[in-house]
Amino acid sequence: MDRRTEIMTVAGRLFSESGYHVTSMRDLAKAVNLQGGSLYAHIASKEEILFEIVSHAADLFLAGAAAVPPDLPPAERVARLVEAHLAVIAREIGNATVFFHEWRFLSPERKAQIQERRDAYEAYFARAIADGVEAGVFRVEDPRLATLFVLSALNWTYQWYDPAGPIPPDEFARQYAAMVLGALGADLPLTPGPSPTRGQGRSTEHAGGAA
Amino acid sequence: MDRRTEIMTVAGRLFSESGYHVTSMRDLAKAVNLQGGSLYAHIASKEEILFEIVSHAADLFLAGAAAVPPDLPPAERVARLVEAHLAVIAREIGNATVFFHEWRFLSPERKAQIQERRDAYEAYFARAIADGVEAGVFRVEDPRLATLFVLSALNWTYQWYDPAGPIPPDEFARQYAAMVLGALGADLPLTPGPSPTRGQGRSTEHAGGAA
DNA sequence: CCTACCGATCGGTAGG
DNA sequence: CCTACCGATCGGTAGG
C-alpha cells in the first residue's frame, strides 16, 4: 500500500470515528507518522481526501447493484440488491459511514458528482420495485415511497451494524431481505417454515445507535 | 419567544442546514442580530445549545411513543408508533436532523443522557414487536433485528422527507406504517382494496438524499 | 448587550 | 518529507 492509499485508508477510519471537521490534518498526519505539512506532498487538500473516500464508497455501492442480473425475477432481484448493499457496509463500514455522514461537506461540484451516482443507485431499486409491481408480485401503493422506504432501512444500518458482532453478514442480509420483501407486500417469500422459536429472545447486544 | 428560545430555534435551523461544527457562534450571533460575545449572556457554551436541541427532540420522540396506549393490539400499536415518529419529523424536521446527525458531538456525560432516552424509545418498539410475535400476528425470525429494521426505516426519513412536499404527513405515515407491518410479516393489515393504479407513476419529486 | 481581546488551532504554503 | 511559518478563524472572556 503506497503512502497515498495509506492516507486515504487511515482518513476513512478517522473521519468515520470523529467526523470530518473534528479530524484535523495534524491528527491525520500523526496517524500516518508524518508532519502536518507533509501530507500535502501526497494530496491537494483535505476535501480531496473526503471526496476520494466518498467516491470510492459510491463506486462500491454502484458496482454491487450493477452486478445483480437485471433479468432476475423482481423479488429475487430486490433480495440481491439488499444483500449487495449490506455486503458493502459489512466490508467497508468506515468508508460507508463517511459516505453517508459527511458527503454533504463536499464542494457543490463534487457533491453533484456523488448525487448522480446516488440517483443511479436508487434507480436500480426503483426499477426492481416497479417491475415487481407491474408483475403483480409486489403490493405497494406508491412505488416511489416504497423505494425510499427500502433505501431508508438499508442506509441507516451503518449506524448500528457491527460485522464482527453476533450476526454474521450473510445471515444478517438474508433476514433483512426477507423483511424488505415483506414491506413490499410480497407473500412471505423466503421465510423458513413455521419455527417461531428461532432466534427469539436472543438480545443481540448491538447497543444504541438505532433509535 | 424570549431571546434564549430564539437562539435555540435559530441554532436548530443553522445546525441542521450546515452542521454543528461548520456553524460558528458568530454565524449564530449574526442570525439573531447579536455580536458574537453577546450570545454568552444567554447560554453557557456552544455545546449547551446542541444539548438543548438534541434533548428537546429526544423528549418529543419519547412523548410521542409514550402516548400510544400500551394495551392496543400489537399491530395497531406499531402503526401508532410509526405515525408518532413521523409526526415529530414532519413537525420539527430541523431539530430532528440535529438530533440524528450531531448528537455524537455531545460530551460523554450528555451523550450518555441522550443514549438512555434512545434506549427507552427503542424499547417501545421492541415491546410492541415482541408482543406481536408472541400473539402470533407478526412473523419475524429475530425480534431484535426486526426492531432495528423498523427503526432504521424510520430514522433515515429526516434525510429526504419534506413535510411541505407532495405527500401530506398523515398520508405519508399511513403508507409507511403499512410497509412496516408488512416487514413484520403481519398479513396485509390496512391495505386498501385492489386499486393498483393508486399513486402509481407519480414520481413524487423528492430528489436525492436516500440512496 | 457591546467592544476588545485571549490563546489555540485551523488548512495550507514556501523553501529547502 | 521536514521546518517554519502564513492569515484566518475558532469558542470564549473581561470589563463595562
Image (cartoon, coloured by chain):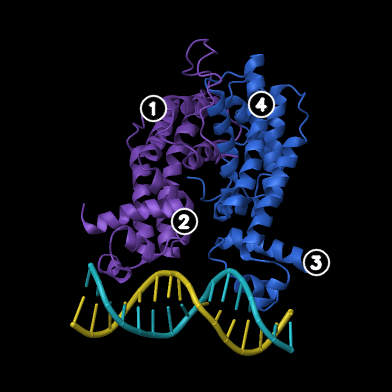
Chain colours: A blue, B purple, C cyan, D yellow
**Nearer the camera: disc 2 or disc 1:** 2
Pick whichever, B94 or B165, lies toward us: B165
Specify which label sits upstream in the sequence, 4 or 3. 3
> Whole-Å distance between the Cαs marked 4 and 3?
40 Å
Q: Chain of mark 4?
A: A
Amino acid under label 1? Asp
Q: Is residue C15 above or below residue B206?
A: below
> Whole-Å distance between the Cαs marked 3 and 1?
54 Å
Residue at position x 34%, y 50% in the image: B56
**Pointers 3 and 2 in contact (CB under 8 A)?**
no
Dot 2: what SS? loop
Labels 4, 3: one chain: yes
Specify which label sits upstream in the sequence, 2 or 1. 2
Q: Which residue is mark 3?
A: A2
Amino acid under label 4? Arg
Q: Which residue is mark 2?
A: B19
Dot 1: what SS? helix
Q: Residues within 10 Å of mark 4 (few under 14, many from 20)?
A: some
Corner quadrant of residue A135: top right
Q: Is residue A77 left or right of residue B9?
A: right
Pick whichever, A49 or A140, lies toward us: A49
Residue B137, image x, y percentages: 51, 23
Numbered disc total: 4
Residue A28, image x, y percentages: 64, 70
Q: Which residue is mark 4?
A: A127
Dot 3: what SS? loop
**Pointers 4 and 1 in contact (CB under 8 A)?**
no
Labels 2, 1: one chain: yes
Amino acid under label 2? Gly
Q: Is residue B97 above or below residue A134?
A: below
Corner quadrant of residue A119: top right
> Whole-Å distance between the Cαs marked 4 and 1?
26 Å
